[in-house]
Structures are given as C-alpha cells and as structure tokens.
Image (tube, rainbow, N blue to C red):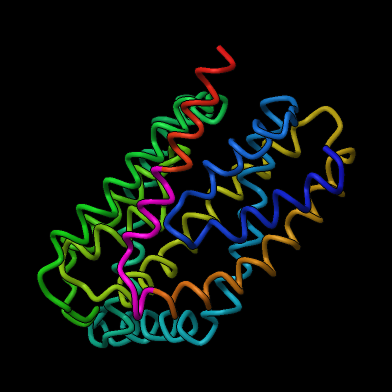
Amino acid sequence: MTIFQAVVLGIVQGLTEFLPVSSSAHLVLVPWWLGWSWDPDVTFTFDVLVQLGTLVGVIVFFARDLLGLVIGAWNGLLRRQPFETPEARRAWFIILATFPAVIAGLAFKESVERAFASPTATSAFLLVTAAILLVSERLARSERSLESMTWREALWIGVAQAASLFPGVSRSGATIGAGRALGFRRQEAAHFSFLMSVPVMLGAGVLAAKDFASMSDPAAHALPLLTGFVAAAIVGYLSIRWMLAFVGRHPLTAFAVYCVVVGLAGLATSLLRG
C-alpha cells in the first residue's frame, strides 16, 4: 500500500464513518473499483486500525461529553447510586449497548473477515442499510429526548450496532435508525450513536493492533497506516460536525438513496466483471 492510497482511504474512512453510508463498504468498494489490491489480512487490519483515526475525531469532538459521562458514572458508583444522574445513566447505557457488538465480533470474526473480501456481499448489504434508514424514518412517530431512554432501548440500539460488523451495514445508519424507530430525535439519536462508537472502535482497534503486530513485517506497513490514521482523524472530526448539523434539519432519506445507488453500482460491476 502506497502513501497516496493510504491517504485516499483515510479520507474515505473519515468522510463515511459517521455518515449512515457504511465506511467499511467504501473501504471495500473504492480499492476494488480503482483496481488496488493487497494481501487480505493486511487489508482487513488496515481497515480496522484506520478507524482509530476516526475514534480520535470522536474523542476530540465530544471531549466534554465523554468527561461528563466518566465523572457521572464514577460519582454514581462512589455514592452507590449508579443511575443517579442523566450522565451516569447514559454512560452505563453506552456500556450496555456495547455488549452485543463484542459478543457478535467474537462469534463471527471469520465470517466478517470473509465478507470484507466480497465486494458483491458488501454491495448487497448497502441495500440493507438503505432499507433500515427508510423504515426507521417511517416508524418514527415521536420526538423523544435521550433523557427518556430505557436500558432495554439502549440494548436494542446495541443489537443494531452488532449488525454493522458486516461491511455495507452502516454502524451509524443502524444505530441512528434504531434510535429513530424508537422515537428519538434525529440529532439525539446521532449523538448517542457517535458516543457509543467509542468503546466498540477502541476494542476493535486493540484486536487489530494485535494482528498488525503479528504480521511478518509490520514496519513495512507502519507509514501508510499512520498517514491513513491522520487523514481519517481530521476528516472524521469535520464529518461529525457536518452530520449533526444536517440531521438537525433533514431526514435520512438522502443517505438511503445514496446507499441504493452505490449498492446497485457495486452489484452491476460485480456482474460485468463476472
């Protein structure tokens, strides 16, 4: 992988991680369309580790919120009232919502890795994301705030996040869609979605780092990974800011249309190439 390719993929990751269009799908389809190919193990590890760049973007953008969650949860434990404040409840809900993805990731790791090697499957999953976005907008009948969230609802959003392990199923699309289907306002559903990405991205990054260290020559891939990481961090931060402003005023329909177009383009390319 060249530096140029790593920067392009880092920008793609940063642009699409927080938009409900599946960053993993773009990391599969863009190199495929451009004719770039690498060892599958290197590709999968790069795709996961470059997500740590967008994790940095989340942490920087939501630093005050994350600090409030940590302090709220810690103070609640000290007072033996873990759900005493809204911040404490939200912190525990985020942890609860992480468990389905952890369990699914351990159970289906090999299947997920195989899916990353299949542009056809990835393209088909993009159509699933489009359906999720359209159905969630149709089901949304109220405009609730996160203050009214229950632990069951947090767990349901976590199940939606687990489905996004497969490339093409957008993590933000699945979780924002689940939040919308439960009646939460778009901006608040997006806010919760971005915050709950932190532990999942961190855990996936740690596992991918172990795979990276076990490669025969990890130093040869270090510089492209670093440049992709930096590009993803910068663009990811800007993408969060834009997305929160957008969903405050517009429905998710435009993203559903985009997923249909890209998904069908991927399937058509697969058919043409045989």
Q: Residue at x 63, y 35 (%)?
A: 44
Image quarter in which the N terminus is found? top right
Is-magenta flag for residue 250?
yes
Residue situated in front as seen by the camera: 161 or 27: 27
Image quarter in which the C terminus is found? top right
| Left or right: 71, with 141 as reference point | right
Q: Position of residue 85 (x, y in %)?
A: 26, 88
Residue situated in front as seen by the camera: 182 or 266: 266
| Left or right: 221, with 89 as reference point | right
Q: Position of residue 59 (x, y in %)?
A: 57, 74
Is 217 situated above or below 273? below
Corner quadrant of residue 146: bottom left
Q: Position of residue 93 (x, y in %)?
A: 29, 68
| Left or right: 3, with 183 as reference point | right
Query: In the image as oriented, which residue stretches furthest toward the top?
Result: 274
Give, as a single range, the part of the protein colored magenta.
247-260
Is 99 situated above or below 113? below
Is 24 situated above or below 114? below
Q: Position of residue 113 (x, y in %)?
A: 53, 29
Corner quadrant of residue 95: bottom left
Residue situated in front as seen by the camera: 60 or 73: 60
Corner quadrant of residue 105: top left
Q: Residue at x 20, y 52 (%)?
A: 135
Q: Residue at x 53, y 52 (%)?
A: 203
Is 11 situated above or below 218? below
The total of numbered circles placed on residues is 0
Is-magenta flag for residue 18?
no
